[in-house]
Amino acid sequence: MDIASVLNAYDRSRLTLTSIGSHSALEVAYGARAQGIANLVITAKGRERTYTEHYRRWETPVPRGCVDETLELAAFTDLLNADVQQALLARNAIFVANRSFEVYLHQKFSYDEIERGMRVPFFGNRYLLRAEERDEAANQYAMMERAAIRFPRQFASPDEIDRLVMVKAPHAKVSFERAFFLVSSPKEYRKTSKRLISEGMLTKDGLRNAVIEEYLLGPSVNLNFFYSPILGELELMGTDTRRQTNLEGFRNVPPAVFDALRAVPMRLEEAGHIAATLTESMLEKAFDMGERFAAAARDANAPGVIGPFALQCIIVAGPPKEFVCYDVSLRIPGSPGTRYTPYSAYRWGRDVSVGERIAMEVVMARDTKRLQDVLT
């Protein structure tokens, strides 16, 4: 995409931060407002009230809300329609991709079609989004290997299972979700997968493409980073952990009822996030890992990561304690709660949310005539 020609047609004094109305759209809208930039949330029919009513921006009788404007589509996949793209270009839009954008559009379009069809500049590297998919050749595992970041051991075949593993397969009924189950032997794998296929959670085709990886014991923490091309620096915006159904329920039941739940499949659907801090001794390890990943991403797909990305880790027991990364997010994370950890305040003297940090970078880039350095 020719960013220069698009920016030449833009009124840079009237930029609009834009995102899909799901996942982290309110975070982007809030951040834009905090930095004096307009915002637009793209909604799908039947999913608009959060943005058109509950968090709509009002100035009277008192200022409140954060969403300036919404654009309602019949379905999110209409985003690639020529008239929608033209409407966004007319608003001087800068698009902030979130996981919902990838999930909903990828149900209909290939990543090639998404990358070409989005004529609106992205904040961040649009060409790295596909690396989150495990079936892409240059995926997150390839980048972690390049960065010498430890990730869970993977098993090429169920017959190799010799320890507790998590099996990650596409959900049979909900295409953008995965089905998870834990087993510790080939026999248990065959028994559990057969049951889940009969219950309609898995398909045989989906199971053939499943990832089998060792299950690591330890607390989970998402390291939410921000790489600033303007400053040439890596920041730790904050740390959090996920709340997931029905895993959260499993964790809270007494051991006496474990047998009654043995046949209940694990779902791990996102329900939210909560702030979780690190011991200070782990910070240097976190930054080192983030810097190595940013360098690997730059080598794999220049200009590499721009803005937010997250390394989702388990901290395994030592000595010494160690991060093991089980997943990577190459766009804005789903947790606005990172501002409630102290790390952005240590840097900026106040709590800065990831949405505001994106807007700050856009403002710095605009004011120094370097927008092309943060957009693709």
Image (tube, rainbow, N blue to C red):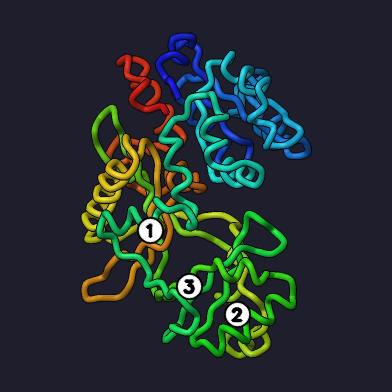
**Spatial distance from mark 1 to mark 3, Cα to Cα?**
13 Å
The residue at 49%/57% (across/down) is: 135
- What residue is disc 3 on? 212
Q: Are the residues flagged by discs 2 and 3 in contact, CB closer than 8 Å?
A: no
Does 121 sit left or right of 318 as displayed? right
For numbered disc 1, what is the local secondary structure? helix
The nearer-to-camera label among 2 and 1 is 1
Kindly indicate the quadrant of the structure image that contains residue 83: top right
- What residue is disc 2 on? 253
Residue 271 is situated, as x and y percent measured from the top left of the image, at 60, 57
Q: Which kind of residue does numbered mark 1 sit on?
A: Tyr
Kindly indicate the quadrant of the structure image that contains residue 58: top right
Callout 1 crowding tier (Cα within 10 Å): few <14, some 14–19, many ≥20: many
Q: Which kind of residue does numbered mark 2 sit on?
A: Val
Residue 202 is situated, as x and y percent measured from the top left of the image, at 67, 70
The nearer-to-camera label among 2 and 3 is 3
Identify which residue, 76 or 63, lies in the foreground: 76
Q: Are the residues flagged by discs 1 and 3 in contact, CB closer than 8 Å?
A: no
The residue at 59%/57% (across/down) is: 270
Identify which residue, 213 or 253, lies in the foreground: 213
Up-down relation of residue 291 to residue 124 (above or below): below
Does 53 sit left or right of 207 as displayed? right
For numbered disc 2, what is the local secondary structure? loop
**Spatial distance from mark 2 to mark 3, Cα to Cα?**
26 Å
Q: Which kind of residue does numbered mark 3 sit on?
A: Ile
For numbered disc 3, what is the local secondary structure? strand
- What residue is disc 1 on? 141
Q: Are the residues flagged by discs 2 and 1 in contact, CB closer than 8 Å?
A: no
